[in-house]
Amino acid sequence: DLQTAIDGLAKQHYLAVVYDRPILLYISNQEYPKRTEVLAETFERQDYAIAVAQNSQLRAPLNLALLETIAADNWQNVLRRYLGNENL
């Protein structure tokens, strides 16, 4: 599992772990600061989505909330808090 892999990386049992970059950034910065490094290179971009039923009344409010969130002044601060300064 991922947690075991990253723990092994932090203990220098492994040279690298390949996984989803935002998740690696979060775990690296929150649980192993200065003990692991997430490289900027990626093998394949992974996008995220929130699925709602076709014609759902939730689609418009969800889209609006997401757009408002990422446009907010504090969005970059949130990213830094969870993903680290060097990764933005």
Image (cartoon, rainbow, N blue to C red):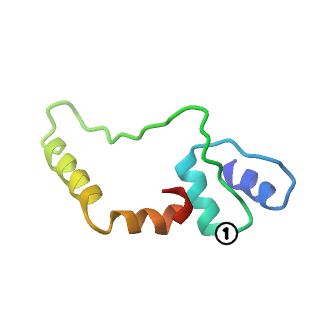
In the image, 85 versus 22, the foreground residue is 85
Mark 1, residues whose alpha carbon is within 10 Å: few (<14), some, or many (≥20)?
some
Q: Identify residue for label 1.
A: 33
Along the horizontal axis of the image, is 88 left or right of 67?
right
Compared to residue 2, the image places residue 30 above or below, namely below
Q: Position of residue 36 (x, y in %)?
A: 72, 60
Q: Is residue 84 visible?
A: no
Compared to residue 85, the image places residue 56 above or below, namely above
Along the horizontal axis of the image, is 17 left or right of 73?
right
Q: Position of residue 51 (x, y in %)?
A: 31, 38
Identify the residue shown where x is 32% and y is 69%: 74
Q: Is residue 38 visible?
A: yes
Which quarter of the picture shows residue 27? bottom right
Identify the residue shown where x is 78% and y is 55%: 9
Q: Position of residue 34 (x, y in %)?
A: 70, 68
Identify the residue shown where x is 60% and y is 47%: 40
Compared to residue 79, the image places residue 56 above or below, namely above
Along the horizontal axis of the image, is 36 left or right of 51?
right
